[in-house]
Structure formats: C-alpha cells, structure tokens
Amino acid sequence: SAVISQKPSRDICQRGTSLTIQCQVDSQVTMMFWYRQQPGQSLTLIATANQGSEATYESGFVIDKFPISRPNLTFSTLTVSNMSPEDSSIYLCSAGTGLGNGYTFGSGTRLTVV
Amino acid sequence: AQSVSQHNHHVILSEAASLELGCNYSYGGTVNLFWYVQYPGQHLQLLLKYFSGDPLVKGIKGFEAEFIKSKFSFNLRKPSVQWSDTAEYFCAVSPNTDKLIFGTGTRLQVFP
C-alpha cells in the first residue's frame, strides 16, 4: 500500500495567520482526502482532493477557509486560513487507489493556534 | 441523521481477556465496512474490511469482525487480547461512495 509523508508534523501558529500542510504519496493514487481530528473526537472528512480540479468539500467546510490543491496524482496541500483557536486539531491526509485496497493515512499534523 | 456509532469509548482489559467492540451505523442500502487501529504514536492502519460475502471477516493480528445486516452492526472481536493491542480503534463506513465516515473511536487499554 501507499506510504504517505505529511509535513509539518506539528506547528504552533498565531491566530489570523495561515498554515499549509503538505501530503506526499510514494506512488500514484486515485483518491486523496483530508480529515480533521479534534481533541477527543473522531475523524471528520473535510474534503476530497481532486487531481486537476477543485476539491469536493463536505458540509460545514468551505474553500475559503480550507483551500486544497492537488496538482498531480501523488501530492496535495491543505491550507488552514485565517486561523482561530478553534482550528486547533490534528489534520490528516489519506490516500489510496480505491476502497477495495483500503486507504492509507499520514501521521498527521498537530496544529495549535494561539 | 446518518452516522457511525461506537458505544464503548474506553475499554480496559487484562491480557488474555476477550474483546468485543461495538459499531453501529445508520446508513441504508449497500455499505462497505472497515475497522482501523491507531497504536500510540503511530498512524491509522487498516485492520480489516467487509465488502460482501461471508459476514465474518478476519483481519490482521487475530482480529475478526461480524457484519449483521439486520442490526446494522459490524462488531470487532478478538478472543484473547495482548498488551500490544493497546490502541484506539475506529469503525468506518463507506455508504456506497469512495469516502470513509468514521465512528468516534474506542480507546482500548490492556494491562499485563
């Protein structure tokens, strides 16, 4: 299965700033996703990153707040914009060639907004 | 509302005890079902999955899960847990899409 490198692994940011998280997969994948895991809660799907087109966002998440890029089949970025303390969370990248093989997850980015 | 429920938030067991973690979902129609595990300090890993066929599926590390359609359940089991099974376990459902919807997770602590 694919191996995912996610950077940075953690960061502490000032409110009002933006952070871009990178997700690099070691092989071409069909599907890439971004999740958020808030303290003590489960993983919530933010969006599906579509190669060469705009991401598909889940209810409650908007492009202005979480712009996503996916320029090719192995790389995606998630930006958390105009951050507030409520954005403090772990952000996870997930990828795979299809449900049948299961999806691989990155190790996550632990974001703290102060 | 459509959801995935894991009723056990925190389970504490002694080594060699049997384990059963509950997972219920509220999606209708065809669903694909998964259990993922996250060991301390590690990333999420797939334990097992169910798409069709035999409702009793076997995964890695001695885990198995049973799909009961009439109960909308996909419970995870292991006959004898080990200290190394200490982890967080997530049930996930794919309701006829490519996306995974996760349950709230169950934290398992196994004491020697």
Image (cartoon, rainbow, N blue to C red):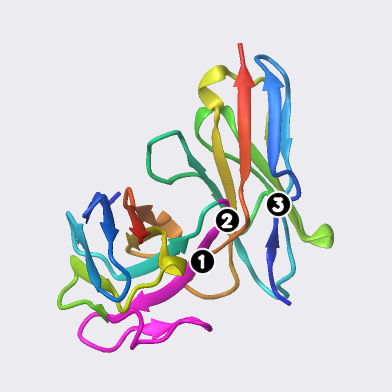
Measured in 3D between alpha carbons, the distance from the residue under mark 2 to the one under mark 1, in whole angstroms, is: 9 Å
Measured in 3D between alpha carbons, the distance from the residue under mark 2 to the one under mark 3, in whole angstroms, is: 12 Å
- In front of the other: B11 or A53: B11
> Which chain's residue wears label 1?
A
**What label does residue A41 carry, if any?**
2
Above or below residue A1? Residue B110 is above
> Which chain's residue wears label 2?
A
- Bounds of the magenta segment: A40-67
Q: Secondary structure at mark 1?
A: strand
Q: Secondary structure at mark 3?
A: loop
Q: Quadrant of residue A42?
A: bottom right
Number of the front mark, 2 or 3: 2
**What label does residue A44 carry, if any?**
1
> Which amino acid does the dot numbered 3 rest on?
Gln
Residue under label 3: B6
Pointers 2 and 1 in contact (CB under 8 A)? yes
Main secondary structure found in the magenta portion? loop
Give how far across and how far down residue A47 sits, in percent.
Answer: 40, 76
Can residue B79 be seen from the camera position used here? no
Q: Secondary structure at mark 2?
A: loop
> Which chain's residue wears label 3?
B
Measured in 3D between alpha carbons, the distance from the residue under mark 1 to the one under mark 3, in whole angstroms, is: 15 Å
Q: Quadrant of residue B28?
A: bottom right
Can residue A18 be seen from the camera position used here? yes
Mark 2, residues whose alpha carbon is within 10 Å: few (<14), some, or many (≥20)? Answer: few
Residue drawn at the location 41% of the way across and 61% of the way down: A88
* Horizontal relation, residue B97 to residue A111: left or right: right
Residue drawn at the location 35% of the way across and 61% of the way down: A114
